[in-house]
Amino acid sequence: MAPVSVPRQQHLLLIILSLAAAAGVQAHLAVATAPPVRASAPASPSYRCGWCPRRATAALLPPDAAAITGAACGYGPGPAAPELADGGFHIAAVTPGLYRGGRACGACYQLRCRDGALCAKDGVKVVVVADAPTGTNITGAGAGRFLLTKGAFAAMTNHDGGDRLARAAVDVDFRRIPCAYKNKNLSVKVEEASVRSRGRLAFRFLFQGGQTDIVAVEVAQAVTNDASAPSMWQYMTRSERSPGVWRTSRAPQGPLRLRIVITAGSGGKWLRSDGAVLPADWVPGAVYDTGLRVADVAASTCGGASCGSDDEDGDEDLR
């Protein structure tokens, strides 16, 4: 049976309406606002989410994985590390239940030891940059694990507990928190499989601030620098093999503008770039600045997929 064609505007409208319906509110095509949401557990005044109820552990990255740089999520060596450090974050790899095929890429978490005698009070902040190396030994039904660098372990522990913790996996509480980048806008990294001459474009997002999920992406030719000029928008879909990647086989000729829908409050919010993001001669492997800053915190990012649940809700999962 031939696939059903859905108009671009209707496609994105349905996404926004589904987000709002799941939260029990009406959707608006403008910025959606909502009153503060009460967490299921007491939360820090600066964080909306309470601690996840699921069991998790933290362990050091295996010696043979010490060179992890976040390539799986597009955070390669070089500029990513300083930007993460500026926000007080360390890199971490996570096991499949938390990684969710790449949807967790770029998500930020706070970890703290359940044994308060061994850990610093506030624990450590990490950003997910990769899935756990093949062969990582995880025991316990439903267990999730954060694999940390030595620097992250040192930040999480107190002086007396560090050596003891480093020798084995330890139980931790964890919760999703907003990401913060002092000097970076939301950026896109073009995947190596992209072919400009054939209209094949695939990219992933980097440096997504706030605590939101990207649920829709569109590109259009930037005919002028006027962001309000009419455009023919081409919507992109998630890659089945790597949900953190957005792709289209019908990319217009560059330069290209970008607009996205993110979860915000209890609904959806449009963000659109001012002018071109990708130049006419864009190349695979390059990183391009969208000029957008994301600082929203979405109610839907607390619990559920953020805690590594088995409940899959499509676009309401982690980014």
Image (cartoon, rainbow, N blue to C red):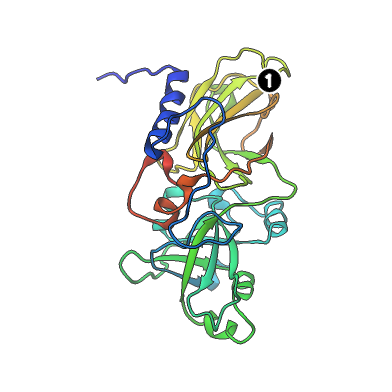
Residue behind mark 1: 227
Find the residue positioned furthest to the front. 35
Asked whether the viewer can see residue 61, the reply is: no
Vertical side of 73 occupied by 32: above or below: above
Q: Is 226 left, or right, of 173 in this rendering? A: right
Task: Give x and y (percent) for residue 296.
Answer: 59, 43
Residue occupying the far left of the picture: 1
| Residue 215 in the figure: left or right of residue 279 | left
- Rendered residue at 54%/49% (across/down): 73
Q: Nearer the viewer, residue 69 or 273?
A: 273
Whether residue 54 appears in this view of the structure is: yes
Label 1 Cα crowd, 10 Å radius (few <14 / some 14-19 / many 20+): some
Farthest top residue?
230
Q: Quadrant of residue 275?
A: top right
Q: Nearer the viewer, residue 11 or 257?
A: 11
Q: Is residue 309 left or right of residue 81?
A: left
Q: Residue at x 56, y 48 (%)?
A: 211
* Amino acid carrying mark 1 in the image: Ala
- In-image side of 157 versus 22 (left or right): right
Query: Eyeballing the image, is 208 above or below 252?
Result: below
169 shown above or below 178: below
Residue 106, image x, y percentages:
56, 50
Residue located at (61% from left, 57% from top) = 46
Rendered-image quadrant of the N terminus:
top left
Residue 38 placed where, x, y %?
48, 52
Q: Nearer the viewer, residue 121 or 276?
A: 121
Secondary element at image label 1: loop
Q: How many marks?
A: 1
Image location of residue 157, percent across then percent down: 59, 77
Residue positioned 53% across, 79% down in the render: 116
